[in-house]
Image: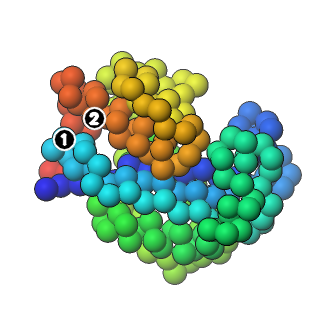
Amino acid sequence: MTHVVVFDLEFTAWPGSMEHRWLRPGEYREVVQIGAVKVDTAGFHEVAAFNALAKPRLNPHLSRYFETLTGVTNETLARDGVDFAEAYRAFVAFADGTQICAFGRDDLVLGDNLKLYGLRAMPPLPPFTNIVSWLVDQGIDPRGLHACDIARATGADFDGRRHDALDDARSVALGIATLVARGAPDPFANVLAA
């Protein structure tokens, strides 16, 4: 059986961060949560899940905006969070060389965090696919959407928590499964055949 890992990230944010593209002084997209599901490509059913909280180094105190948006609090992070390097290594181990994909370029955010923290001797990410262009080919307009919106955009029922990285990864996986079940081409057929 062949698998694909669908993942999503939550990273530090403040009011206006998205509009200003994290370019204001002191704002960095430091990863706080990595959520992922491993799905079989036969039916896009979840076979394993991954969830890690990472403690930001440069802005260690989460903004109230971020806490409200994601549900991840400073208390939760203090109790359950690990250093980004540990969370990153655990995610790469979870993927175990399997093709990874996300709604958008979360792979670049992971790479930016490696550079931001000067982490050079880290395992590389597995091959990555940005699922956005495939969704566009299936008639889904991604403008204004986040990973948490993908299941509903495809007509699937999904009641996960918005802006929770694990639930958002599940939303993307469900959106893919829904479209494939309706006859859309397998978005990973060419990648997995290579």
Q: Amino acid at mark 2?
A: Ala
Q: Quadrant of the N terminus?
A: bottom left
Q: Nearer the viewer, residue 112 or 35?
A: 35
Q: Does residue 4 lie above or below 179 as drawn?
A: below
Q: Nearer the viewer, residue 111 or 12?
A: 12
Q: Does residue 125 lie above or below 3 as drawn?
A: below
Q: Position of residue 149 (x, y in %)?
A: 50, 30
Q: Position of residue 174 (x, y in %)?
A: 34, 36
Q: Earlier in the sequence, mark 1 or mark 2?
A: 1
Residue named by callout 1: 43
Residue named by callout 2: 177
> For the point 36% across and 25% down, which residue is it?
156
Q: Amino acid at mark 1?
A: Gly
Q: Which mark is residue 186?
A: none
Is mark 1 in CB contact (under 8 Å) with mark 2? yes
> For the point 36% across and 32% down, which residue is it?
175
